[in-house]
């Protein structure tokens, strides 16, 4: 019975470590997702701004004599 209780204690300790690692991993994955989404948004905004500038220049060139 002592051996069983020893294993049970080890299992509880290992599970506690697992839970901490799982929570940390989940948190880091969420942070990565947030960073990737922010980077994608910045990229899309830069692309839209560039397209707007190109269109503005094209219109100015068409309007020039």
Image (cartoon, grey):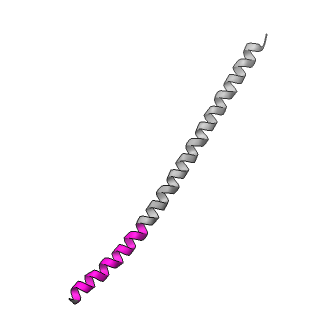
User: Which is the main secondary structure of the residues drawn in magenta?
Assistant: helix
Q: Is residue 43 left or right of residue 19?
A: right
Q: Is residue 4 above or below residue 37?
A: below
Span shown in magenta: 2-21
Residue furthest right in the image: 65
The location of residue 57, given as percent across then percent down, is 72, 22
Query: Considering the image in quadrants, where does the C terminus appear?
Result: top right
Q: Is residue 40 left or right of residue 3?
A: right
Q: Which residue is found at the position 49% from the left and 56% from the top?
A: 30
User: Is residue 6 highlighted in magenta?
Assistant: yes
The location of residue 43, given as percent across then percent down, is 59, 39
Q: Is residue 43 left or right of residue 27?
A: right
Q: Is residue 39 above or below residue 59?
A: below
Image quadrant where residue 58 sits: top right
Q: Which residue is found at the position 54% from the left and 52% from the top?
A: 34
Q: Is residue 58 left or right of residue 32?
A: right
User: Is residue 48 highlighted in magenta?
Assistant: no
Q: Is residue 49 above or below residue 60?
A: below
Q: Which residue is found at the position 41% from the left and 67% from the top?
A: 21
């Amino acid at each position: 019975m002592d051996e069983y209780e020893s294993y049970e204690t080890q299992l509880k300790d290992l599970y506690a470590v697992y839970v901490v690692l799982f929570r940390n991993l989940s948190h880091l994955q969420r942070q990565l997702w947030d960073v990737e989404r922010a980077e994608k948004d910045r990229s899309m905004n830069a692309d839209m701004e560039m397209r707007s500038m190109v269109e503005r220049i094209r219109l100015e060139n068409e309007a020039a004599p």
